[in-house]
Amino acid sequence: MRNLILAILLALWATAVSADIWECVDGSGYKRFTNLRNEAKGCKLLNVGPPNTLPSPRPEARSTPPGFPKVDGNTQKQRDNDRRKILEQELAGEERLLAQARKELEEQEGVRLGSEKNYQRVLDRLEPYKKKVKLHEDNVANLRRELAGAK
């Protein structure tokens, strides 16, 4: 009974909140939408229902199907350790590449070519080096985040 009363009140509230929407098309074919009645002369009233105020249903938790292969705890622990080692190796490689990219950028920042009287040309020449540094910085950050969440 209480749920029925709540549903009725919710439905009344939702209809009270809804507004009329008009679609207006000018001489050039451009569409304009308004909810103001005084701006809606010659416009078509759209049939817009009340907003959805109910929460979406939660999906049911799925159980493991019968016959699905299971992994014992020791095997999973070994897999987790292998994954950690691989991530650590990738992190070490990315840190080396980052150091190399920073060194290349630093070297290029120290060079001034005769054809670069306009400073924008210097910035354009340095842009690929800066992108390379940024890429390796992002990779290092992502690998560290992955390692922090690893078991």
Image: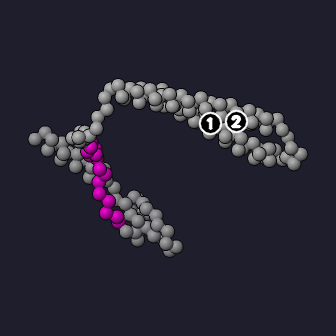
Q: Residue at x 28, y 45 (%)?
A: 56
Residue at numbered disc 2: 101
- Answer whether labels 1 and 2 touch (C-beta < 8 Å): yes
- The answer to whether residue 56 is magenta is yes
- Predominant SS of the magenta segment: loop
The answer to whether residue 76 is left or right of residue 147 is left
Q: Residue at x 44, y 26 (%)?
A: 81
Provide residue 76's location: percent of width, then percent of height: 36, 29
Q: Nearer the viewer, residue 70 or 116?
A: 70
Q: Residue at x 70, y 33 (%)?
A: 100
Estimate how packed mark 2 is, as few (under 14), some (14 to 19) or many (20 or more) residues with alpha carbons within 10 Å: many
Q: What is the CA distance from the residue labelled 1 to the residue labelled 2?
A: 8 Å
Provide residue 12's location: percent of width, then percent of height: 22, 49
Quarter of the image for residue 74 reads top left
Please state which amino acid type lies under the numbered disc 2: Ala
**Looking at the image, what colour scheme do you see?**
one colour
Outermost residue, right side: 114
Provide residue 35's location: percent of width, then percent of height: 39, 58
Estimate how packed mark 1 is, as few (under 14), some (14 to 19) or many (20 or more) residues with alpha carbons within 10 Å: many
Q: Which residues are magenta?
A: 45-59
Residue at numbered disc 1: 136
Outermost residue, bottom side: 27
The answer to whether residue 66 is left or right of residue 33 is left
> Which quadrant does the C terminus fall into?
top left
